[in-house]
Amino acid sequence: MLKTKRLQCCSVDMVLVSHMMNRAGSSSILIIRLGVYASDPVYWYMKMHDGQKNKHGKLNNHAEIKNIKLQSGCCVKILVSASCIIFRRIDFKNSMINKNMKAIGFLLERTIIGDIDKFHTINLKWDNDFCYVAAVEHKLMNRWLGWLKEANISAKIIMPDVLALPFSLGKFSAVKLSNEWLIRNSQLSGFSISSEILAKILDSKFSLAHVNTFSSSGNDAINWQSTQYCDVLRIMAENIDYCNANFLCGKYNHFSSLEMNGLTIFRTAFLCLILSAAVCLNYWFDRYKIARDIDVLNRVSQEFYANTFPVDNENRNNTGHFNDYIEHYRDIESSANFIDLFYMTSPVIDSIDSNVNSVSFNKDARIMSYNISVDESNTVELKLKEASNKLNGVVLNQVSNDSNSHDVIFKYAP
């Protein structure tokens, strides 16, 4: 019956774990694209994993973010406008610098106008002699995090929107949101500009560049037609996982998502299961150790009792024989013991400024003798006289030798 109940419990646990894994794999993803200013529109796209149709929308400003209906366990990823984000490649000769953000910040400050302490810098990619970084002002990070806090939303990542665009070597990728063009010009950089400025750039320096516009019309530089914002966000949602950029690091690491999504619930339940098993095993092991120690203690005590009071079945009821047991125990207790006598006499020897040449112990005579060497005999005799008054049950004698040595003798009092 007990085995059947255990199998049923295991079956229930497996069903629960399977349910959690399925739930973790079916959690939805919400992508929110934030602007720089409070009046900028906010775009959002919810990618569903349970067979439902994906959702999207456009909000007038950040104050309407709270109107987005989040599903349970939804993973929130934030895209921010690249118009105020700085992308740089930093070259250095010392390979120890590549992961030192303070040193990288100092090198980055040479390429920007402003105080680097006002920027939050992240390392996008590094090698032995170079690294790619992205920097954004702290005031913008605090502004975006403040908007999310007002909407009671916890984000998993915050990254530049241009890095969520697809990228092909040697080609640009460009999409348009409102009157702003988002352009990814390399694997780890991009920029955001207005339509008017883009037209001038394409007419001059980048006129021969290959550009993926994701447009349903022609590729004329001036008359590019933008796709609908929902298609732009869909493209970003499909490519957002291919870049590991995340501004929620360093001093902003504690702002990362704290919501319990399905995967987190599964991990928590799994860790609780392991912890419960560890506690049970530890409890059983402790009980085993206690039982083992009790058994050892019983055997030792029985051996001690057998040595101290040998069993005599014939005379165990004899009162005189019992008295012999008592006398035998007292003899053992009163017999000279090296450890006890050494412990009692060593403080006396330590109080004398002397060198101990040898120590002898005679158990039968119940004597311990120290042979010491000192410079002044009078001092030794005085200190020994003071110490003898403090000893209890031990008689102290001192004998001077011809070799400028002294024998200090301790003997149990009769």
Image (spheres, rainbow, N blue to C red):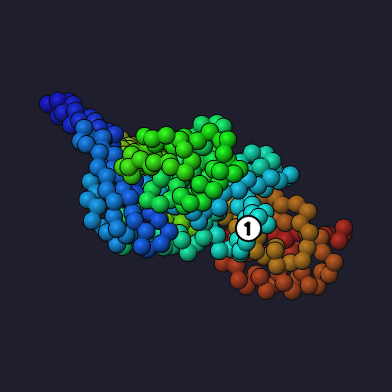
The amino acid beneath tag 1 is Ile
Disc 1 element: loop
User: Relative to residue 322, is residue 355 depicted above or below?
Assistant: below
Does residue 209 appear to the left or right of 398 in the view shown?
left
Residue at figure coordinates x 48%, y 51% from the top left = 196
Q: Among all residues in the image, which is located at the extreme left? A: 1
| Residue in front for this viewpoint, 136 or 3 | 136
Question: Dot 1 surroundings within 10 Å: few (below 14), some, or many (20 or more)?
Answer: few
Does residue 35 appear to the left or right of 374 in the view shown?
left
**Any part of residue 363 in sight:** no
**Any part of residue 392 in sight:** yes
Q: Position of residue 59 (x, y in %)?
A: 28, 55
Q: Position of residue 393 (x, y in %)?
A: 56, 64
User: Relative to residue 366, is residue 284 depicted above or below?
Assistant: above
| Residue in front for this viewpoint, 335 or 53 | 53
Q: Quadrant of the N terminus?
A: top left
Q: Position of residue 195 (x, y in %)?
A: 46, 50
Q: Position of residue 83 (x, y in %)?
A: 49, 54
Residue at figure coordinates x 46%, y 56% from the top left = 252
Q: Among all residues in the image, which is located at the extreme right? A: 403
Does residue 154 appear to the left or right of 407 in the view shown?
left
- The residue that label 1 is drawn on is 112
Specify the quadrant of the image occupied by residue 381: bottom right
Q: Quadrant of the C terminus?
A: bottom right
Does residue 9 appear to the left or right of 213 in the view shown?
left
Residue at figure coordinates x 76%, y 56% from the top left = 356
